Image (cartoon, rainbow, N blue to C red):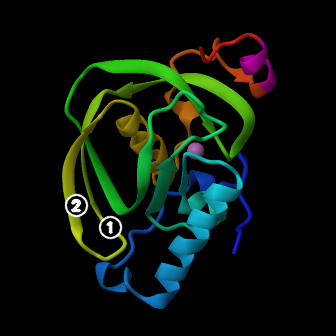
Amino acid sequence: MILKVARLGHPVLRQIAEPVPPDEITSPEVQQFIDDMIETMYEYDGAGLAAPQVHVSQQIVVMEVAQNPRYPNAPDIPLTVYINPEITPLTDEQVEDWEGCLSVPGMRGRVPRHTRIRLQAYDRDGQRLDFVVEGFHARVIQHECDHVQGKVYLDRMTSMASLTFTEEFIKYGMGE
Ligand code: NI
């Protein structure tokens, strides 16, 4: 089922989401919800989606990048589900790149992110994950995990000068 996406201004996007009790991860309800999140992400060509973006204040994020028309130059990321994610930055170094968000439709901005992070989370089978990730994949994880903490990418921008509409982004070749 395709879910309705919450847009900036909906209070759910600003709440800190509830962790999912680990023994409930494999329940039919949570599994169905994860499937619905994935279907919704595909429908709107998102690189990722967090549960608060579909009005559910739970710490669940999904992501996949495979020939995404919204991010044509992005490297592929396999379909992944992270539950109760915790990020530890492993570098002080931050790099700026373009981000967009289904909850902030029609806009892009340059966002600094840590280039290397440790991610601890559960997967959709309830298995514990703990790994280090870098680059664009680390960027997407930081963007999606911010959503479960009530943050959007605009909060991370150090200047609003790069904020642009998607049409102008394409017109002026900003992503190239
Ligand atoms: Ni987003």
Write the residue at 73% across / 50% down: 7
Marks 1 and 2, how far apart at CA: 7 Å
Write the residue at 24% across / 22% down: 92
Count of marks, rendered view:
2
User: Can you give x and y, in whole percent of width and height, for residue 129 in the image?
Assistant: 22, 61
Q: Secondary structure at mark 2?
A: strand
Q: Which residue bears the numbered disc 2? A: 129
In the image, residue 130 above or below residue 168: below
Queried whether the magenta region covers residue 111, the answer comes back as: no
144 sits left or right of 137 in the view: right
Q: Which residue bears the numbered disc 1? A: 123
Q: Name the disc covering residue 54, or none.
A: none
Q: Secondary structure at mark 1?
A: loop
115 sits left or right of 145 in the view: left
Q: Main secondary structure of the magenta part?
A: helix
Q: CB under 8 Å between callouts 1 and 2?
A: yes
Q: Quadrant of ligand 1?
A: top right
Queried whether the magenta region covers residue 170, the answer comes back as: yes
Q: Is mark 1 within 8 Å of ligand 1?
A: no
Quick one: 111 or 81, which is closer to the camera? 81
Q: Amino acid at mark 2?
A: Leu
Write the residue at 37% across / 72% down: 124
Q: Residue placed farthest to the front in the image?
A: 67
Magenta stretch in the rendered image: 167-171
Mark 1 or mark 2, earlier in chain? 1
Q: Amino acid at mark 1?
A: Asp
Mark 1 neighbour density, 10 Å: few (under 14) some (14–19) many (20 or more): many
User: Can you give x and y, in whole percent of width and height, for residue 169 in the image?
Assistant: 72, 19
Image quarter where the N terminus lies is bottom right
